[in-house]
Amino acid sequence: QLQLQESGPGLVKPSETLSLTCTVSGGSTSSSAYYWGWIRQPPGKGLEWIGTFYYSGSTYYNPSLKSRVTISGDTSKNQFSLKLTSVTAADTAVYYCARMEYYYHSSGYQKYFDYWGQGTLVTVSS
Amino acid sequence: QSVLTQPPSVSGAPGQRVTISCTGSTSNIGAGSHVHWYQQLPGSAPKLLVYGNTNRPSGVPDRFSGSRSGTSASLAITGLQAEDEADYYCQSYDSTLSGWIFGEGTKLTVL
């Protein structure tokens, strides 16, 4: 059974960099069959896609966060990571990592999040 | 404000049928991007409920069904149960934003 586990500091100071790691067990981040993503949820609010990583090194970022986000992978550790720079209180959220399944349809490749980590709360505060 | 619009809340009595709408545009659902649905129980991570507009992953009861028409999609829940009380989110891909998008979420209350 695939499992994902987020880890990292729960408290980050304003203007600093938020760093989180997702460790995958029961599956491989070096597989060509899946993508890997980060999603966040501010307290009491909805879900926001942050970015996506593919084993080849390709990355895709939410345009609204693109200037501050970096997602990378470490296949030797079966992990992928998120870095978000210059954080403010608006970045306070539960951060989830998730696997993205994909398939081809006549309208193009489709992707969805089929397995999620439990999430980790990151608070931005001095 | 999300590009996928969902009603903030819906409610129904046990045993009843409810539907949750997800309204998009010609740059996402109307462009052929499939819609996927997630259930988020209180204090838990989202769980995949429907993928590819109409498909249920193994283990999801057939009380849950998805549909899509034009620039909108819907999630129907029949035989409502107390355990269905949760937040529900739709998700698709937007070609204008070049990214994956979620609806604002709908809170289902079982009366």
Image: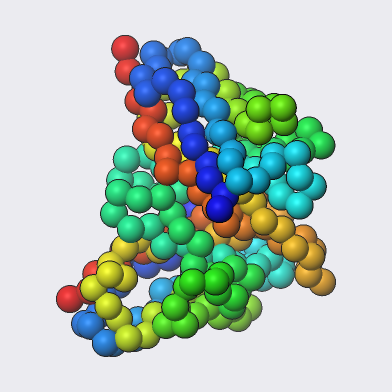
How many badges with numbers are in the image?
A: 0
Give the residue displayed 69% in from the left and 39% down from the top. Answer: A29
Position of residue A1 relative to residue B74, above or below, is above
Q: Is residue A111 left or right of residue A96?
A: right
Picture quarter with the C terminus of chain A? top left
Residue A57: horizontal and vertical position, in percent?
Answer: 78, 33
Residue B63: horizontal and vertical position, in percent?
Answer: 42, 82
Q: Is residue B17 left or right of residue B46?
A: left
The single residue placed furthest to the left in the displayed view is: B111
Give the residue displayed 31% in from the left and 71% down from the top. Answer: B84
Residue B28 in sight here: yes
Position of residue A19 relative to residue B101, above or below, is above
Q: Nearer the viewer, residue B63 or A59?
A: B63
Quarter of image, res B93: bottom right
Give the residue displayed 58% in from the left and 41% down from the top. Answer: A25
Give the residue displayed 59% in from the left and 75% down from the top. Answer: B55
Q: Nearer the viewer, residue A30 or B51?
A: A30
Q: Nearer the viewer, residue B91 or B40?
A: B40
Q: Nearer the viewer, residue A13 or A75?
A: A75
Residue A1: horizontal and vertical position, in percent?
Answer: 56, 53
Q: How is the image coloured?
A: rainbow
Residue B100 in sight here: no
Residue B50: horizontal and vertical position, in percent?
Answer: 54, 70
Position of residue B95 relative to residue A79, above or below, is below
Q: Is residue A75 left or right of residue A9?
A: right
Position of residue A20 relative to residue A27, above or below, is above
